[in-house]
Image: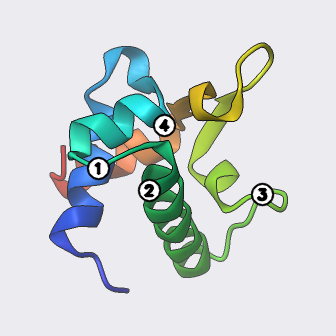
């Protein structure tokens, strides 16, 4: 798998939000990207890559494999994504945090 510096940074950025919870807008801002759409694109591709590597896909949205969504009351750019604890533990083990 192609684990670029950008992909590692993206995982680390999300990891460091309180309780690993952030909107895609917050994540995109922290990465220096123009808006949440760029975040969705990059994070979605990364989630698919990770899912393919692990042979794990949860539902139809790639991001479900690595994040939990809290999408009750917010428009799509404000969905709260919580990085799954299993992923956080893997990042810690890899020293990528």
Which of pointers 1 and 4 lies earlier in the amino acid sequence?
A: 4
Secondary-structure class at tag 3: loop
| Outermost residue toward the right in this view | 59
The mark found on residue 38 in the picture is 2
Q: Quadrant of the C terminus?
A: top left
Labels 4, 2: front one: 2
Labels 4, 3: front one: 4
Q: Residues within 10 Å of mark 2 (few under 14, many from 20)?
A: some
Of residues 42 and 56, the one drawn nearer to the viewer in this rendering:
42
Q: Position of residue 26 (x, y in %)?
A: 37, 29
Of residues 23 and 12, the one drawn nearer to the viewer in this rendering:
23
Q: Residue at x 24, y 36 (%)?
A: 30
Which of pointers 1 and 2 lies earlier in the amino acid sequence?
A: 1
The mark found on residue 59 in the picture is none
Q: Residues within 10 Å of mark 3 (few under 14, many from 20)?
A: few
Label 3: which residue?
58
Secondary-structure class at tag 4: helix
Do the residues bearing badges 2 and 3 touch, measured as CB atoms within 8 Å?
no
Label 1: which residue?
33
């Amino acid at each position: 798998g192609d684990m670029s510096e950008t992909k590692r940074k993206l995982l680390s950025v999300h990891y460091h939000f309180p309780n690993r919870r952030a909107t895609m807008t917050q994540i995109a801002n922290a990465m220096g990207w123009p808006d949440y759409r760029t975040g969705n694109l990059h994070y979605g591709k990364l989630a698919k890559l990770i899912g393919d590597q692990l042979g794990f896909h949860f539902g139809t949205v790639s991001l479900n494999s690595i994040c939990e969504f809290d999408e009750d009351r917010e428009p799509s750019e404000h969905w709260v994504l919580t990085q799954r604890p299993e992923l956080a533990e893997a990042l810690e083990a890899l020293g990528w945090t």
